[in-house]
Amino acid sequence: MRTHDRLRIAIQKSGRLSDPARDLLARAGLSFRESRDRLFCYGESLPIDLLLVRDDDIPGLIAEGACDLGVVGGNVLEEQACERLADGRGEAFRPIRELGFGRCRLSVAVPNDWEWTGPQRLAGLRIATSYPQLMARWLREQGVEATPVMLSGSVEIAPRLGKAEAICDIVSTGGTLMANQLKEVAVILESQALLVAPSQPFGDERAELAAMLLRRLDAVMSVRASKLVLFQAHRDQVAELVKLLPDAETPTVMAIEGQRDQVALQALCRSAMTWQRLEDMKRAGASGLLVLPVEQMLA
Ligand code: PRP
Ligand code: ZN
């Protein structure tokens, strides 16, 4: 039995989620000493350790109590939650934060040269997937009967191998589908990295460690989305420009030495500054627009 005065977080050992997960934890002030086998990282700055595992194992590790928290894709979590439900095991884990990275979708894809007429097009066909639960749920909702072909990897080559007519797999950039002459025809689930915890709250020191980690992660994530926008404008245009920044805190307006009508502004924006927004601001009279990332913030 391990002691419960340290918190143990499971993350993907290698793959799409591993670098962003480690980066997020580092920004929250966690540092680790890596073991020789690279599977366990001992927390140095705080009593919070890391376990590096296959992403598919993370929900199970949390259910068993072998880990306290995990970073895992919504696709994996939802599939395993459905599986537990289907075979009568109780709910054992739940997502507690969306982490904003690892965005992807679980989609149905078919060969490029197919004419797609809707889900009924799949009736009676074989669909290869690593997500049998989510796929079966979607097929039920669509009222389509098809045969699932379970594959744990390389799902996208199944049609070429003659193992299935269509596939249901994760799409991120779409590069894998394109390389295999497949096209995405239906999105079954939108996914991103989630922080996962056991359904039962911690009844010991881990509760406080988890609460502190969450406070820090929330701060890091809110800073990440924020941008500092600097620009100049004529005094008369300020009111109009501020309307274009509805998510900004009250902008600071500063005088410019030697100029009567022109002022400098600075505003903290809580959501993404797109090119579109910048162009709208320029049209409304802003000049010298500068968008800067925010490093740290303490309100
Ligand atoms: C998925 C999926 C594809 C790839 C698609 O694997 O199985 O191979 O990503 O990405 P793309 O659209 O950017 O080409 P995933 O990263 O989830 O790995 P895993 O299934 O091995 O965990
Ligand atoms: Zn995986």
Image: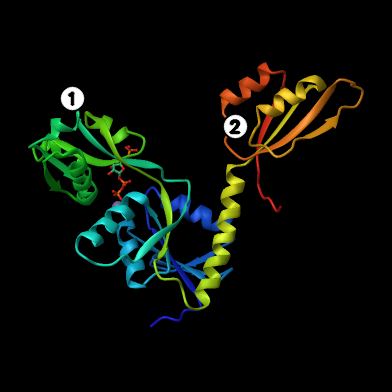
State which image quarter holds ligand 1: top left
Q: Residue furthest top?
A: 283
Q: Quadrant of the N terminus?
A: bottom left
In the shown orientation, is residue 80 left or right of residue 299?
left
Q: Please, is residue 297 above or below residue 94 in the view?
A: above
**Mark whose residue sits in front, 1 or 2:** 1
Residue 15 is situated, as x and y percent measured from the top left of the image, at 36, 50
Q: Please, is residue 283 above or below residue 199 in the view?
A: above
Seen at 62% across and 47% down, the residue is: 223
Q: Amino acid at mark 2?
A: Met
What residue sits right under mark 1 in the picture? 117
Q: Please, is residue 151 above or below residue 48 in the view?
A: above
What kind of element bears circle 2? loop
What kind of element bears circle 1? loop
Marks 1 and 2, Cα distance to the nearest angstrom?
Answer: 38 Å
Q: Quadrant of residue 276?
A: top right
What residue sits right under mark 2 in the picture? 273
Seen at 21% across and 42% down, the residue is: 141
In the shown orientation, is residue 242 left or right of residue 223?
right
Residue 39 is situated, as x and y percent measured from the top left of the image, at 38, 66
Seen at 31% across and 65% down, the residue is: 91
Residue 163 is situated, as x and y percent measured from the top left of the image, at 9, 41
Name the residue nearer the viewer: 55 or 212: 212
